């Protein structure tokens, strides 16, 4: 077949990127859904209660590219806004939303108002509306952007926010499942259709079937059927199935309707009307009408119901019951909720859609209520212009709502009872890999506390779609997942075209059949809705697939034949996971070597889509891959094979792609590396030098790994690497290497191994032009104080870094307590005319404990109109850190360790060629972890370094170790990578061979300098007078319950008293011997006695007693003279 | 630069790269209309910049 499969993957990812699912979803939202939302019958018109002739009609909506309006005196200029500028000056990367409306008003001609601004929509980077789309690498670079930046996120007030992919159970499909509580089978459908969301299920109670719905209480099945217009019992049974075993199960439920004396549809509707839980807003008092309305609009909402023709719903209900009964008899019919064909992924566009619709409805109702007030007035002077002005004014709510939701991650939509938190996350820019990992991350909705293993388990249907290695351990294990390299998430396909095509291919409308014929043929479902039946399903499915391969229907439409349930499922809905596969026909792959030449002539995108259009490559979703017979490699292809994997390595994610030879590692080690790869320091993009993140790490001399993988190259991870090719000797040295500690070569550190720059940002805002304040009360930045004879030296020293403008110099070194922005805030007195103004010092004081250097100072004015309200000063500090004891390092195989000892190079082992290791790793790390890949990486890296070539350790492929060994032998090295070393301490040859060579080591973000903490005395908690908690607050070290237990068991009681009382919160109180209460002095007036003694006890004990007193509980202290105490305790 | 201006702090425009001089009360803005200014690194004979030897 093709020898350049790698190229296929690389070129596919070069145009697709890893975040296409986000971008596609956002594009679909902007281009299709916005228009649909605005034009949906419920939103399109605004009417006025007080003036029936008023009508506002939305004609169209559009979103513009992000712009920025700058004004200069009277002129204002609209210019394109670029993401980098947003990051710098805390702006939102958003484009204006414009609508065209037609307004009908009393006594006026209908007026079309064009381009009414109703808010600003945050724009996803890389989407069609983004100003960067279609730009070349060089241009992107000019706009301060990294050409390798993954994009697919938003910038809200300067912060990069990702809307995570949300995993949900599929809507509009029948799912038969076992109920956790009752242990009974339940057949459920979650309907979701434009405006309505409802759930309907068939449950079994005492052998009788009931319909459980969100709109009415549990209703007997047969009564529901009758309410749907199927009055004849025989007909109902025929809709479900006439097999004797099915009829038998139905017998019990049969009696319900006759017991209730329900004979007609009206009887049944009235019965259900009584069961309705939430009443309509007084639309109709008639119970039957209410029931009819509920059945039409809420019950099985996704099944169309024209003019109250309930027959399609009855058929659907029949299918639900049938599935349930079949599942009761045969377990194969039970659906698996964790099966990935029954899952849908919700991307940014889907979630924004819900939010926008809610806000848009909010705007409409606000406008409507304003109109009611204004037009209701007797002398109404409201013009259409005023209406649009109001729309513009309240459109700010849309802007704010969108921004707030993305910023905080709180999605609250009352219509759908949706109140979700943590929908968005801040894009982690620790390394390039962490950003990529975040954009391919998926969250499940299952609660973390739930102790079922099902949703967490790795199931077969995830193969090729979800990475088996990349998931966190701990409580999120298996709930947070990562997409595999080639996985794509579908967008909704316009259904009409598919619908027409399948009707023309012999699918007959189900209503044309007698119910008794339903179960003889295959039923065809389109997006979960029954469209008809087909007599020759295999032929139909084959032909439909041919049409798809020719591009007649959307490439992402899935065609799945379920022989067990006798069903053909055709799905074009959004959120399905799909992946490309090579088609195989008659035992021959359709994509052959010659096709790869196209990549030389055309760009990757056109070539790949031509492969799809010519039926060489096909996208399969999880359901359809059940019908496919997929060969892993070309050697596995037989005559029955239908598809061929593009490459086996694509089952892994981009983060796992960092690991060389992952197929030789114990799987847990790959999972650990996936977590650590996201913490490794490197370069996060080509624009790091001009970025201003709150915290940014940058490795000063990053190296590209000697042993690479294809997936690394496909996503540019080799261009933005995170780590060094360290020369490693696997041997024991000095005992400071136990428990995974590493021995470092001091000279290597001098040469720059692991050296990292840490940038920290601090923002000072200065309100210099507040509208409601006089200018003399505004905040200002003052010059540093000058030296006079009575100023203290210490006082002046704090200001050493300041320039004349009161802001720190660039390049100055700041120590703890130094001032870097000398801000002053005048206090507004009660009576500004007479009183003197007090000016308070409100400077920005440097809080870090170790010195930093000022890297950059930005002075920003980010108000849109000409007036400047807030002057923002962003100071970026830099610190260069070389590795020290306790800093964390890791190889790419889940093998982390801390620096245990830094050794002078002369004490390190070396060989006669002059080679000397950068670090020494203890061989005990290998046997229990079984990271064979690390051994292989070393061997390949060694040869790569000698040859001057990069070696490949791609998953399920890569270099042949035997060959590598032989090559090493040819070059005069041991074929197993061992070498003879001379001890640096004794100068003698070592008695053993040492396994040595280059291994790619990552420096992790956990550094001792950020964690080191000690305190003798320090701040106390106000309430309890005990030491505060935490390093940031200079807190104490807690002696907790378990530590206390240890002291107790050891008998160190004086130590306990010291720790828990003397060093914590000792307090002296007076206690009356008679009443046993606290007294303020040595007399108790209540008991009229002076037998009041001073005792010492923890302050929080005193607090407890007082709190108990406040609750009417009297804790009485019984005093015992100290010399009698021994006796007292004995008794 | 005038002798008077020697004590004044010079900023650099983030877009056009020109030097900008501002008084404390001036609006933060370059002549080109850009509103992000950077402080200029200036030689200070008293405290010459010194790299840490690490």
Image (tube, coloured by chain):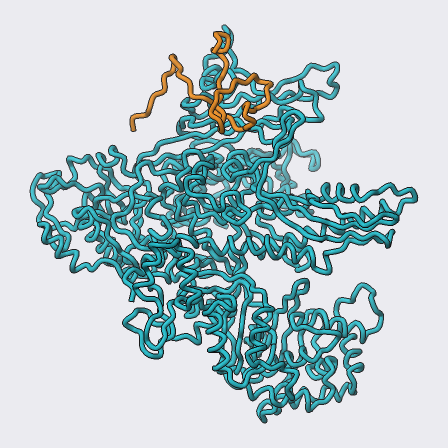
Chain colours: A cyan, B orange
Q: Is residue A899 shown left or right of residue A390?
A: left
- How far across and how far down the image is residue A438, in percent? 45, 51
User: Would residue A205 be visible to someone looking at this image?
Assistant: no
Depicted A421 relative to depicted A587: above or below = above
Q: Which residue is drawn at 51% across and 20% down?
A: B20
Q: Which of A547 and A97 is in front in this view?
A: A547
Nearest the viewer among A1099 and A466 is: A466
Identity of the residue drawn at 60% across and 57% down:
A32
Counting from the top left corner in percent of width and height, residue A368 is at 79, 50
Farthest residue toward the bottom? A244
Q: Which of A450 and A306 is in front in this view?
A: A306
> What is the x, y in percent for residue A793?
46, 13
A588 or A1125, nearer to the observer: A588
- In this view of the protein, can residue A254 be seen by the observer? yes
Q: In which quarter of the image is residue A813?
A: top left
Counting every numbered tag in the picture gives 0
Pick out the residue farthest to the top.
A789
Residue occupying image coordinates x 65% and y 31%: A1083
Which quadrant holds the C terminus of chain B? Answer: top left
Q: In the displayed image of the protein, which residue is found farthest to the left? A: A988
User: Left of A752 or right of it: where is A585?
Assistant: right
Taking the view exactly as shown, the residue that stands out farthest to the front is A601
Q: Position of residue A728 (x, y in %)?
A: 21, 46
Left or right, residue A962 beside residue A278: left
């Amino acid at each position: 077949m093709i020898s350049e499969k790698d190229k296929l993957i690389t070129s596919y990812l070069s145009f697709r990127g890893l975040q296409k699912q986000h971008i596609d979803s956002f594009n679909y939202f902007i281009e299709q859904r916005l228009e649909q939302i605005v034009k949906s019958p419920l939103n399109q018109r605004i009417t006025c209660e007080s003036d029936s002739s008023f009508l506002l009609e939305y004609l169209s909506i559009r979103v513009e590219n992000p712009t920025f309006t700058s004004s200069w005196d009277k002129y204002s200029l609209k210019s394109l806004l670029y993401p980098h500028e947003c990051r710098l000056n805390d702006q939102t990367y958003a484009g204006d939303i414009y609508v065209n409306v037609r307004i009908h008003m009393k006594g006026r001609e209908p007026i079309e108002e064009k381009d009414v601004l109703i808010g600003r929509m945050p724009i996803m980077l890389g989407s069609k509306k983004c100003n960067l789309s279609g730009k070349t690498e060089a241009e992107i670079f000019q706009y301060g952007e990294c050409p390798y930046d993954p994009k697919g996120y938003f910038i809200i007030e300067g912060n990069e926010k990702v809307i995570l992919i949300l995993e949900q159970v599929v809507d509009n499909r029948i799912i038969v499942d076992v109920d956790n509580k009752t242990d009974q089978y339940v057949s459920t459908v979650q309907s979701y259709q434009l405006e309505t969301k409802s759930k309907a299920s068939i449950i079994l109670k005492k052998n009788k079937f009931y319909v459980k719905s969100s709109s009415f209480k549990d209703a007997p099945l047969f009564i529901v059927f009758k309410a749907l217009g199927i009055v004849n019992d025989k007909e109902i049974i025929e809709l479900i199935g006439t097999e004797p075993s099915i009829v038998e199960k139905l017998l019990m439920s049969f009696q319900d309707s006759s017991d209730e004396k329900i004979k007609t549809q009206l009887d049944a509707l009235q019965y259900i009307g009584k069961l309705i839980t939430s009443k309509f807003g007084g639309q109709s008092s008639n119970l039957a009408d209410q029931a009819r309305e509920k059945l039409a609009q809420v019950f099985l909402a996704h099944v169309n119901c024209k003019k109250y023709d309930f027959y399609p719903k009855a058929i659907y209900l029949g299918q639900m019951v049938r599935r349930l009964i079949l599942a009761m008899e045969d377990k194969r019919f039970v659906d698996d909720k964790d099966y990935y064909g029954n899952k849908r992924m919700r991307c940014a566009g889907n979630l924004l859609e819900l939010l926008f619709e809610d806000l848009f409805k909010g705007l409409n109702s606000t406008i409507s209520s304003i109109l009611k007030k204004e037009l209701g007035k007797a002398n109404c002077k409201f013009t259409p212009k005023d209406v649009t002005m109001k729309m513009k004014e309240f459109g700010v709510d849309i802007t704010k709502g969108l921004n707030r939701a993305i910023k905080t991650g709180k999605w609250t939509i009352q219509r759908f009872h949706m109140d979700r938190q943590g929908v968005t996350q801040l894009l982690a820019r620790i390394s390039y890999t962490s950003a990529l990992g975040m954009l391919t991350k998926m969250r499940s909705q299952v609660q973390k506390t739930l102790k079922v293993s099902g949703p967490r388990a790795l199931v077969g249907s995830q193969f090729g779609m979800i990475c088996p290695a990349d998931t966190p351990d701990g409580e999120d294990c298996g709930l947070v997942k990562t997409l595999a390299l080639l996985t794509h998430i579908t967008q909704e396909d316009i259904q009409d075209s598919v619908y027409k095509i399948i009707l023309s291919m012999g699918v007959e409308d189900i209503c044309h059949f007698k119910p008794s014929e339903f179960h003889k043929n295959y039923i065809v479902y389109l997006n979960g809705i029954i469209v008809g039946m087909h007599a020759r399903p295999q032929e139909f499915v084959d032909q439909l697939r041919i049409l798809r391969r020719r591009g007649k229907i959307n490439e992402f439409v899935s065609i799945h034949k379920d022989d067990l349930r006798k069903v053909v499922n055709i799905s074009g809905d959004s959120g399905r996971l799909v992946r490309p596969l090579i088609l195989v026909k008659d035992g021959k792959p359709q994509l052959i070597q010659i096709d790869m030449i196209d990549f030389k002539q055309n760009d990757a995108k056109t070539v790949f889509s031509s492969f799809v259009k010519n039926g060489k490559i096909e996208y399969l979703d999880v359901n359809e891959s059940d019908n496919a017979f997929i060969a892993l490699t070309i050697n596995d292809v037989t005559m029955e094979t239908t598809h061929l994997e593009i490459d086996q390595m694509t089952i892994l994610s981009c983060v796992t792609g960092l690991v060389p030879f992952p197929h030789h590692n114990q799987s847990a080690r790959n999972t650990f590396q996936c977590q650590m790869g996201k913490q490794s320091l490197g370069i996060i993009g080509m624009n790091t030098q001009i970025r201003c993140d709150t915290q940014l790490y940058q490795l000063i001399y990053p190296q590209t790994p000697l042993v690479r993988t294809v997936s690394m190259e496909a996503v540019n991870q080799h261009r933005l690497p995170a780590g060094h090719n360290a020369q490693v000797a696997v041997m024991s040295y000095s005992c400071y290497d136990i428990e995974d500690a590493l021995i470092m070569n001091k000279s290597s550190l001098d040469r720059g191994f692991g050296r990292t720059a840490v940038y920290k940002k601090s923002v000072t805002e200065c309100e210099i032009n507040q509208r409601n304040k006089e200018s003399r009360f505004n905040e200002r930045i003052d010059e540093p104080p000058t030296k006079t004879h009575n100023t203290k030296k210490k006082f002046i020293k704090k200001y050493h870094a300041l320039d004349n403008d009161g802001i720190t110099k660039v390049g100055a070194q700041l120590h703890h307590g130094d001032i870097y922005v000398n801000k002053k805030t005048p206090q507004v007195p009660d009576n500004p005319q007479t009183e003197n103004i007090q000016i308070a010092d409100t400077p920005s004081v440097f809080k870090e404990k170790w010195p930093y250097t000022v890297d950059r100072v930005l002075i920003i004015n980010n108000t849109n109109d000409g007036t400047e309200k807030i002057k923002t000063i962003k100071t970026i500090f830099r610190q260069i850190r070389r590795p020290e004891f306790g800093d964390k390092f890791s190889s790419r195989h889940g093998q982390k360790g801390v620096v245990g000892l830094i050794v002078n190079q002369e004490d390190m082992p070396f060989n006669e060629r002059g080679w000397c290791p950068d670090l020494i790793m203890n061989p005990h790390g290998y046997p229990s972890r079984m990271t064979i890949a690390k051994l292989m990486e070393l061997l390949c890296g060694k040869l790569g370094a000698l040859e001057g070539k990069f070696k490949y350790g791609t998953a399920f492929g890569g270099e042949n170790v035997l060959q590598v060994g032989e090559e090493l032998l040819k070059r005069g090295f041991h074929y197993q990578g061992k070498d003879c070393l001379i001890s640096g301490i004794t100068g003698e040859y070592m008695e053993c061979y040492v396994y040595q060579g280059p291994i790619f080591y990552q420096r992790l973000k956990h550094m001792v300098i950020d964690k080191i903490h000690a305190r003798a005395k320090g701040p106390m908690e106000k309430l309890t007078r005990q030491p505060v908690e935490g390093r940031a607050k200079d807190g104490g070290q807690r002696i907790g319950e378990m530590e206390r237990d240890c002291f107790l068991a050891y008998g160190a009681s004086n130590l306990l008293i010291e720790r828990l009382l003397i060093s914590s919160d000792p307090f002296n109180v007076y206690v009356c011997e008679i009443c046993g209460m606290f007294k303020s002095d040595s007399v108790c007036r209540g008991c009229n006695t002076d037998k009041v003694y001073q005792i010492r006890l923890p302050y929080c004990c005193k607090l407890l007693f007082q709190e108990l007193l406040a609750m009417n509980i009297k804790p009485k202290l019984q005093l015992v003279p100290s010399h009698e105490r021994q006796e007292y305790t004995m008794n | 630069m005038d002798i008077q201006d020697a004590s004044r702090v010079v900023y650099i425009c983030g877009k056009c790269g020109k030097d900008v001089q501002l008084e404390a009360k001036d609006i933060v803005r370059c002549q080109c209309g850009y509103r992000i200014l950077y402080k200029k690194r200036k030689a200070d004979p008293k405290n010459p910049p010194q790299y840490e030897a690490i």
